[in-house]
Image (cartoon, rainbow, N blue to C red):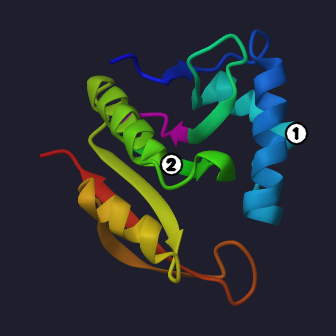
C-alpha cells in the first residue's frame, strides 16, 4: 500500500512557496501565536520546519511542526504542531510528531519540550501517548490570562 504523504524538512529558499502556505494556515489556526512571514525562514535556517505533504505533484500541505533547539543541543522546543483542517482526524500530526521525535533523538537531543493549551484535550492526549509528561503550568505564555501546560519528553 502506497503512503499518501511524504515528510520534508524545509529549506528557506527552495521551499519558499510551501513556507508561505504554512504561514497562511497557521494564521488561521494560531492567530497571533503564529510563526509569521518574518520568522518562518529563520526557523528553517536556525531550527527545523517539518512538513507532511501529499505524495503527488501538488504536494499539498497536510501537517507541520516547527522546532528550535538550544545551542548545546541538549534541549529542543516544539513551537507549532498543526494539521490543515481538510486532513484532520487522520492521525497525521501524530505520525509527523513520531518522525520529529526520532529525528531529534538521532541528533542526540535528550529533552524535548512544548506547550499546549490547557483546554486542548486532544493534543494533550496525543502528546502523552507519545511519551510527554506535564512538567508545569505556564501563565501568560501567549498573552494575558492564557494558561498552558509545559510538557516534556525525556529520552529513556
Instruction: Let me know if residue 78 appears in the view.
Output: yes
Q: Which mark is residue 94?
A: none
Residue 78, disc:
2
Give the residue drawn at x 67%, y 53%.
Answer: 85
Return the x and y of residue 40 as percentages of the image width and height: 76, 35
Q: Residue at x 66, y 48 (%)?
A: 86
Q: Which residues are magenta?
A: 67-73
Please, which residue is most extreme toward the left here?
156
What is the residue that sits farthest to the bottom in this orientation? 145
Q: Residue at x 40, y 69 (%)?
A: 124
The answer to which of 152 and 57 lies nearer the viewer is 57
Q: Which residue is tagged 1?
A: 37
Q: CA distance from mark 2 to mark 1?
A: 18 Å
- Crowd band around label 2 with a 10 angstrom C-alpha radius: few (<14), some (14–19), many (20+): many
Q: Is residue 84 visible?
A: no
The foreground one among 41 and 86 is 86
Res 62 quadrant in image: top right
Amino acid at each position: 500500500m502506497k503512503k499518501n504523504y511524504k515528510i520534508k524538512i524545509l529549506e528557506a529558499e527552495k521551499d519558499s512557496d510551501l513556507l508561505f502556505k504554512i504561514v497562511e494556515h497557521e494564521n488561521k489556526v494560531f492567530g497571533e501565536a503564529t510563526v509569521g512571514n518574518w520568522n518562518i525562514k529563520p526557523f528553517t535556517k536556525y531550527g527545523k520546519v517539518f512538513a507532511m505533504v501529499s505524495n503527488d505533484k501538488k504536494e499539498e500541505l497536510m501537517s507541520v511542526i516547527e522546532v528550535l533547539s538550544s545551542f548545546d543541543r541538549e534541549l529542543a522546543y516544539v513551537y507549532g504542531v498543526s494539521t490543515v483542517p481538510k486532513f484532520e482526524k487522520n492521525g497525521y500530526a501524530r505520525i509527523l510528531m513520531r518522525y520529529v521525535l526520532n529525528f531529534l533523538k538521532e541528533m542526540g537531543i535528550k529533552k524535548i519540550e512544548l506547550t499546549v493549551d490547557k483546554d486542548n484535550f486532544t493534543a494533550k492526549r496525543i502528546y502523552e501517548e507519545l511519551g510527554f509528561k506535564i512538567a508545569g503550568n505556564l501563565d501568560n505564555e501567549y498573552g494575558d490570562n492564557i494558561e498552558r501546560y509545559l510538557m516534556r519528553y525525556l529520552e529513556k
